[in-house]
Amino acid sequence: MSVDAIRFSYANGHKVFDHFSLKARPGEFVAILGPSGCGKTTLLNLLAGFQAPGAGQILINGKPVSPELPELGYVFQAPQLFPWLTALENVRFGLRMAGQGSEAQQREKALDYLRLVGLEPAAQRLAHQLSGGMQQRVSLARTLALEPGVLLMDEPFAALDAISRNTMNEETLRLWAELGQTVLFITHDIDEAVFLADRVIVLNIAPGGIHSELAIDLPRPRSNLVTRRLPAFLDCRNELMERISQVMAQSPVAIPARPLPELTA
């Protein structure tokens, strides 16, 4: 995926991006980090083709981006499930809308992806009967079943409790390692960004651009019990805390902040 010098403003004239560029390598896991109001979700909507830039271009495999591209998948902040359908039928819904296969083939594939996210036993439960973490797994399975090459994830675990969130972070990395998609993951959580990503991009306050990038050279596979205790994890966390502090200091409405304490192993 490549983003080349895009510009975007809201209808009221508020400028969000000005000559913004970004590239993600095939199979790379990129976390996009920034404070509230820096344009993270707007950027993902542009990458998905839900909104169009005023200038510049966004390409996936050399093709202009659009919501209809089969190479593109999107996981929203909220699960976006039909509460009256079962987990299986929610996953199958995406396949049915895409016209992929017969009803029997759709059911088989939907069950395969529920199995992949560990929810085969809950296949016949209605969506409203599932916990928040289980609902987000169903949402993820529905997107993955369409086999996109690029996966856009907009703070998908922000509403979960800390234990469920950490579990879903591990699950996301397991699926990414198995399926090999390029992932662009929006978050405002520094620990989450460090744990997941190959590279973290820090955004400036709008009009947004890239403040800086940080390569995350932590060994894979990663686990909550091991990775989050590594000195290198804490070093990356401290560095990103400092960079976010710099971004906040540049805001026209910035409030002077006390120095952030550094964490050590």
Image (tube, rainbow, N blue to C red):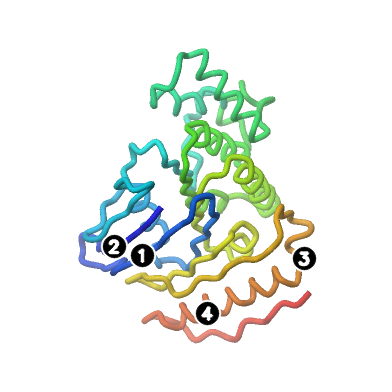
Residue type highlighted by circle 1? Ser
- Distance, label 4 to label 2, CA atoms, is 26 Å
- Distance, label 3 to label 1, CA atoms, is 34 Å
Whichever of callouts 3 and 2 sits on the residue coming sooner in the sequence is 2
Residue 19 horizontal side relative to residue 241, left or right: left
Residue 255 horizontal side relative to residue 10, left or right: right
> Who's the residue at 70% across and 51% down the image?
163
Q: Secondary structure at mark 1?
A: strand
Residue type highlighted by circle 2? Ile
Q: Position of residue 120 (x, y in %)?
A: 66, 26
Q: Position of residue 102 (x, y in %)?
A: 46, 14
What residue is disc 2 on? 6
Q: Quadrant of the C terminus?
A: bottom right
Residue type highlighted by circle 4? Ser
What residue is disc 3 on? 229
Q: Secondary structure at mark 2?
A: strand
Q: Secondary structure at mark 3?
A: loop
What residue is disc 4 on? 245
What residue is disc 1 on? 21
In the image, residue 255 sits, relative to residue 199, either above or below, namely below
Whichever of callouts 3 and 4 sits on the residue coming sooner in the sequence is 3
